[in-house]
Image: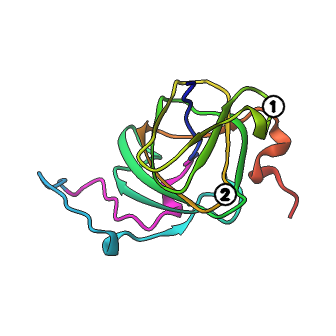
């Protein structure tokens, strides 16, 4: 079974997240995050509107490791794109449909449910969609970004 990863997550700037990231603060040896402590905010403008995101560790806009969560509403799509670093995604709830290639095609995706894991190598063109709400956790190294195959698909280029 072909397993590919999501985009997700396209976090061009950590400023859009409510995570307490400070460069001059020593990171504790241990961190414990319970669900009630997670601060969700709107996903960055590099993703289609409607998703929520939370940075759990690190700063996606800076060099180094980071971990984040993305909550995608029912019917959500992220059109074909690439990332500048390898992406690791674990599906926490719902079913994420993941495909590879330059053209979005729902029929050419793999359904990855809770507990499923996907890895997308640097520069691989991929896309995702979900029928119902999906919550996923992704980790990678920054600085993070997203480049859409078709610039017209990039929400940052939408006419306001």
Question: If the image is split into quadrants, where does the C terminus sit?
Answer: bottom right
Magenta includes 81?
no
Magenta includes 21?
yes
- In the picture as drawn, the residue positioned furthest to the left comes out as 29
Q: Which residues are magenta?
A: 11-25
Q: Which residue is mark 1?
A: 103
Q: Which mark is residue 72?
A: none
User: Where in the figure is residue 118, as x and y percent of width and height?
Assistant: 48, 35
Question: If the image is split into quadrants, where does the N terminus sit?
Answer: top right
Task: Label the magenta part by its dominant secondary structure.
Answer: loop
Q: Residues within 10 Å of mark 2 (few under 14, many from 20)?
A: some
User: Where in the figure is residue 54, as x and y percent of width and height?
Assistant: 45, 61
138 sits to left or right of 124 = left
Please state which of residues 64 and 111 is positioned toward the viewer in this rendering: 111
User: Where in the figure is residue 100, as x and y percent of width and height?
Assistant: 67, 28
In this view, 147 is above or below 123: below
- In the picture as drawn, the residue positioned furthest to the front comes out as 1
Residue 6 position by quadrant? top right
Q: Secondary structure at mark 1?
A: loop
- Indicate which disc, 2 or 1, sits on the residue closer to the N terminus: 2
User: How many angstroms separate mark 2 from mark 1 (CA)?
Assistant: 21 Å
Q: Which mark is residue 45?
A: 2
Q: Secondary structure at mark 2?
A: loop
User: Which residue is at 67% across, 33% downward?
Assistant: 99
């Amino acid at each position: 079974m072909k397993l590919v990863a999501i985009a997700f997550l396209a976090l061009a700037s950590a400023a859009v997240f409510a995570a307490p990231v400070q460069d001059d603060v020593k990171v504790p040896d241990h961190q414990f995050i319970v669900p009630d402590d997670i601060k969700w905010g709107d996903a960055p403008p590099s993703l289609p509107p409607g998703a929520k995101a939370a940075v759990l560790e690190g700063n996606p806009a800076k060099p180094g490791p980071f971990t984040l969560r993305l909550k995608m509403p029912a019917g959500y799509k992220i059109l074909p794109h690439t990332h500048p670093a390898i992406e690791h995604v674990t599906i926490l709830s719902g079913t994420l449909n993941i495909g590879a290639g330059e053209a979005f095609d729902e029929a050419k995706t793999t359904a990855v449910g809770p507990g499923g894991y996907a890895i997308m190598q640097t520069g691989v063109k991929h896309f995702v969609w979900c029928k119902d709400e999906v919550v996923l956790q992704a980790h990678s190294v920054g600085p993070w970004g997203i480049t859409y195959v078709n610039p017209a698909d990039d929400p940052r280029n939408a006419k306001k």
